[in-house]
Amino acid sequence: MGAPVDVYKFGAYYVYIMISLVLMGIISISVFFPVFFKLQVTSIYEYLEKRFDYKTKVLVSFFFIVGEVFTIAIGTYAPSLALSAVTGFHIYYIIICVFGTCIFYTTIGGLKTVVWTDIFQIGIIFLFLLIICAIGLNTTGNFSSLWKTALDGGRLDILNFNLDPTLRDSFWTYIVGCTFQLMIYINLSQSGVQKYLALPTFRQWIWAMVFYVITMEIVEIFCILLGLLFYAHYANCDPFISGKIQRHEQLLPYYTMEIAGHIPGVVGFTLVGLFCATMSTISSSLNAISGVVYKDFLLRCWKGSIKEKTTFLILVLQYLGDLLPLGFSAKSMAYGPTLGVFCLGVLFPKANAKGAFYGAVSSFIFQIFVFVVSRVYRYKKIIVDVPKTFSVSGCWTNTSLATNNTFYNSFIHPNNVTSHSEFKPFFIFRLSHYYNSISGLIVTLIVGLIISYLTNKNDPPVDKELLSPVIRRFLSNDTKSEIDNRELKTLMAKESNTQEK
């Protein structure tokens, strides 16, 4: 629901995510997968205990739970918006019913049900996307007509290679920022890696990643096509400005009702597809959370509290802006420090437990501060994301709206800052949402490496098995023997102390 709306409002920059997926797959296979496959851990965060210490593992496990809470909240809120648009029921009631159903379904079914229902759900998702896109193309006329409308409306003006990190969308925000964001979820979260850990050979890990990339490429093509179809249909009458919908994220169900409401079952099938997507996401997230909580000894702290906290968060989301950038920004509070800690572990042999722990804590505090301040600026309209222009010249229901057919032109200003404010926030608060995780990564690396450098005088050498193959080749061959000698000396010391007692 978020991606097609992003294309509709800001243009087809989202097409660059297809390159990000390929880059993410290459980095996964070459940097992270060899380490995790060799260790064969139950929870991915067990690696951090082996590489650093227990408290670092617990800290990053907590970050994972924070990120998954946002994932569950947004995953529940999105289809609730759709159902609200179709039925007219208040979104609060829908949220309670949807979330309660997800909790019940995941709790009763367990992992086996999650896996088998995912297979069924992905089939429904592809089918509903195919049906809506086919009907939409038929309604628009043909692909050439769709292309011309999008071109005339500026939705295909995506050749922006500016390196300015405060630009909301550009080639580099996706190639750099989105690649790292995807890498965190697929490589460095229990939700993603638990699926690979179930496979017996590294070759199957590689093929699983290949299939994932191909499948997601198809999904992204559908999302981009849907966004262009939205614009082709509403180029002369934006339904949000004309008051027909409450949020742009309701475009998908509203669009479906307009083009296929006369076809029996299509609107219902669209809702089924959306709820299949949210059920799949939420069930996987809840299962991963439960595994991490149990395995990493957080059960006592979190038992019985996730549901209430998440439900409260869902009700707050409606005030925090568009779903897609909100999802990236919110999860970056946990994703940035997580990426930083794992990079310290697999790429920096000199990084130690103190550096990793305090680097992650510093990054987490920094990310929360940036997120809260930037959301306050956006709430006060000091910072706004400037969309492409919309027209309401074709809306006949409200003549006053029809005369204001350049409604958004007054908001078009550089660097996403409104003109009515002379105050220009510091650039860190104006970063593109795709760069938020990278800022957390940078803070973790800088603080972590400085502390490690100041405190690593007596640190033992790191086992090469805990480092990425891209780093091992640059290390001396005696690292393993040094570790063996250290362990032998430790055992001898313990034996000597026992004899003395």
Image (cartoon, grey):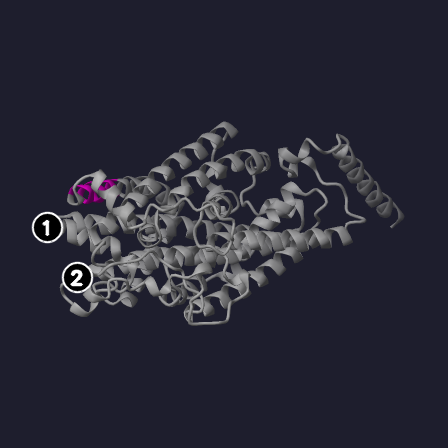
Mark 1 near mark 2, Cβ–Cβ under 8 Å? no
Asked whether the viewer can see residue 80, the reply is no
Disc 1 or 2, which lies upstream in sequence?
Answer: 1
Residues drawn in magenta: 127-138
Q: What mark, if any, has residue 262 been given in the picture?
A: 1
- Give the structural element (helix, strand or loop) at label 1: loop
Front-most of residues 450 and 192: 450
Q: Main secondary structure of the magenta part?
A: helix
Q: Is residue 63 above or below residue 222?
A: below
Residue 126 among those drawn in magenta: no
Which residue position holds label 2?
Answer: 395
Position of residue 426 measured from the top left corner of the image (x, y, whole percent): 55, 65
**Kind of residue sitting beneath label 2:** Cys
Front-most of residues 231 and 393: 393
Q: Residue at x 49, y 42 (%)?
A: 193
Toward which corner of the image does residue 35 lie, by quadrant?
Answer: top right
Position of residue 307 measured from the top left corner of the image (x, y, whole percent): 41, 62
Of the residues tagged 1 and 2, which is closer to the observer?
2
- Give the structural element (helix, strand or loop) at label 2: loop
Give the total of numbered labels: 2
Describe residue 82's horizontal placement relative to residue 52 as left or right. Answer: left
Position of residue 409 measured from the top left corner of the image (x, y, whole percent): 33, 62
Position of residue 252 measured from the top left corner of the image (x, y, whole percent): 25, 53
